[in-house]
Image: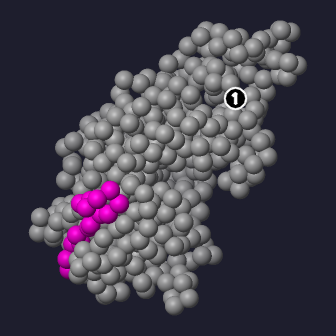
């Protein structure tokens, strides 16, 4: 009989307050100015008898995405967060506030110039120094290999202006540049990551683990402890990360003892799995959200129709009955623990009668009594498209199919891979697209909004609003934090009024553990998961 195994989400979230030291031990990067003052932070751990006994243990992870790329510039989340191989200049705490990491401090000299001071004595996995020259090269390399980073960060160039000082110049003002230095794709890597022709050899970072092998045929990444880490070495000797895109496969592998940890288990299996002697399940809310993007070129071009659709979504039922409590109704784009969230907004209201009224105002009526509204001879029928890697999405699609039927909409559900989704969207053969979107890839009040509401991003779905562009530009130039947050809140209000995207539920992640895995500390800033480096495995 297992004692104290069940962990309610309320208890788990509340416990974050009491384990903040443990949170800072997650593999998200160091968070202090020097080794002596940050021994319990970032990737760093405190040496214990338990960690010593776990020194020869291997943690086996079942990853929800296929692993076919380990380039840290294009798949930084895997290499930085999930493998703990690389680190970033700026980290964040559990409130998404910036903390020092490989950079100990930073300041803007003018609206286009930032100076970062680096932590001294750090070495890459190949033994080379992480100095200003190396960091400047790493930043410039990321911009060259991943042009989307240029668009988002506005960086023109990085250059060494001292042994441990890097100056970054932006093309246009970016008041949140330090926040963008938290992006996983901007992790600091050594030149040895690539050969002389620019081809990937393997990621060379500064983190507590280093790459031993990547088997591209099996999609298995093997990492080993970096015994020369610039802080306390990790507890475990080795970690294997295996791509398992089917949630049922991950569940079976966990139950069979083939893996020790995974996330996004099938929701209908959570209770059964948690009752097994060798498995436990823990649920947490993350910085991700279930979204419903509308095709504004078609049936959803009318704002009243989008608003009606949102009002007809019974988010509480989806949270309780569909997601089994793994996720809460989304009131806004951001969660309330983010400093820039406008907590006065509540977009989670369920009001079917008001939704019906709005549809009628938009000219959609059920004139023949068949239960489907029509206008100008066209039935209100569309396809909801989504993918299966996140097991909640198909379930939400089916729930919306039923809920929107009550509004007089006929919804067809189609699940497919990302390539097929892009093809469908290009052809316009969709009505809504359901996804799980990270709202804090950078701990920024503007980053997510710019990526989803600028005309450049919304024009392909048939929606353009110059007011968004005006506010986004204002926010990017607002160097005063409170002013920037106020601009962000204006954008949030406009977004929740216009609704080119509706927000369904905050993304609750269900982690599955072997009971042998101990000392896990949840990191609320993780994108899927980060495992703390003082995690242990018992016999």
- Height in image: 482 above or below 411? below
Q: Residue shown at 34%/34% (left/top)?
A: 486
Furthest residue toward left: 36
* Residue 519: image location, x then y, percent: 27, 55
Instruction: Report the front residue among 240 and 254.
Output: 240
- The answer, for residue 437, to whether it is visible in the render is no
Q: Tag 1: Cα neighbours inside 10 Å, few (<14), some, or many (≥20)?
A: many
Q: Residue shown at 35%/86% (left/top)?
A: 126
* Residue stretch rendered in magenta on the structure: 107-121
Disc 1 element? helix
Give the side of residue 31 with respect to residue 88, left or right: left
- Height in image: 26 above or below 272? below
Report the colour scheme: one colour
Where on the picture, by quarter, is residue 158? bottom left
Instruction: Report the front residue among 392 and 502.
Output: 502
- Is residue 111 within the magenta segment? yes
Dominant SS type (magenta): strand
Q: Which residue is mark 1?
A: 300
* Residue 313: image location, x then y, percent: 58, 23
Q: Residue shown at 35%/27% (left/top)?
A: 343
- Height in image: 32 above or below 334? below
Give the side of residue 462 with respect to residue 249, left or right: right
- Is residue 105 within the magenta segment? no
Where on the picture, by quarter, is residue 531? bottom left
Furthest residue toward bottom: 196
- Height in image: 152 above or below 240? above
Q: Residue shown at 21%/48% (left/top)?
A: 19
* Residue 521: image location, x then y, percent: 29, 52
């Amino acid at each position: 009989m297992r004692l104290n195994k069940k962990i309610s989400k309320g208890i788990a979230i509340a416990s974050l307050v009491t384990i903040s030291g443990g949170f800072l031990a997650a593999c998200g990067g160091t968070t202090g100015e020097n080794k002596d003052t940050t021994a319990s932070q970032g990737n760093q751990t405190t040496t214990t008898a338990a960690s010593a006994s776990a020194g020869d243990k291997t943690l086996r992870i079942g990853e929800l995405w296929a692993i076919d790329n380990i380039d840290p510039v294009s798949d930084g989340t895997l290499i930085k967060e999930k493998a703990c191989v690389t680190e970033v200049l700026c980290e964040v705490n559990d409130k998404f506030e910036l903390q020092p990491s490989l950079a100990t401090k930073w300041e803007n000299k003018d609206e286009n110039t930032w100076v970062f001071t680096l932590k001294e004595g750090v070495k890459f996995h190949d033994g080379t120094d992480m100095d200003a020259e190396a960091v400047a090269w790493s930043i410039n390399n990321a911009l060259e290999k991943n042009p989307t980073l240029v668009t988002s960060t506005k960086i023109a160039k990085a250059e060494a202006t001292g042994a441990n000082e890097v100056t970054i110049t932006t093309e246009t003002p970016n008041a949140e540049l330090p926040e963008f230095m938290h992006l996983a794709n901007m992790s600091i890597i050594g030149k040895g990551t690539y050969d002389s022709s620019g081809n990937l050899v393997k990621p060379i970072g500064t983190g507590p683990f280093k790459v031993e092998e990547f088997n591209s045929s099996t999609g298995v990444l093997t990492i080993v402890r970096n015994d020369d880490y610039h802080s306390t070495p990790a507890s475990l000797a080795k970690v294997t990360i295996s791509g398992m895109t089917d949630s049922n496969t991950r569940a079976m592998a966990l139950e069979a003892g083939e893996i020790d940890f995974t996330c996004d288990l099938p929701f209908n299996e959570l209770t059964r799995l948690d009752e097994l002697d060798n498995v436990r399940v823990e649920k947490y809310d993350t910085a991700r959200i279930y979204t419903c993007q509308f095709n504004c070129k078609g049936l959803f071009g009318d704002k009243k129709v989008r608003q009606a659709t949102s009002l007809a979504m019974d988010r509480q039922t989806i949270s309780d009955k569909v997601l089994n409590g793994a996720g809460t109704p989304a009131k806004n784009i951001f969660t309330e623990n983010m400093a820039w969230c406008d907590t006065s907004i509540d977009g989670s209201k369920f009001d079917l009668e008001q939704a019906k009224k709005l549809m009628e105002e938009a000219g959609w009526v059920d004139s023949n009594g068949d239960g489907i509204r029509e206008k100008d001879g066209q039935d209100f029928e569309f396809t909801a498209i989504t993918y299966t890697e996140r097991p909640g999405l198909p379930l939400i699609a089916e729930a919306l199919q039923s809920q929107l039927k009550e509004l007089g909409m006929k919804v067809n559900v189609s699940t497919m891979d990302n390539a097929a989704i892009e093809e469908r969207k290009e052809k316009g053969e969709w009505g809504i697209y359901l996804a799980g979107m990270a709202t804090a890839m950078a701990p920024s009040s503007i980053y997510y909004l710019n990526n989803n509401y600028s005309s450049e991003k919304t024009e392909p779905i048939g929606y353009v609003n110059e007011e968004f562009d005006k506010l986004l530009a204002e926010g990017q130039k607002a160097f005063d934090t409170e002013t920037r947050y106020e601009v962000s809140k204006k954008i949030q209000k406009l977004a929740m009024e216009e609704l080119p995207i509706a927000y369904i539920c905050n993304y609750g992640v269900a982690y599955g553990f072997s009971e042998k895995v101990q000392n896990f500390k949840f990191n609320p800033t993780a994108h899927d998961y980060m495992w703390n480096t003082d995690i242990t495995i018992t016999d």
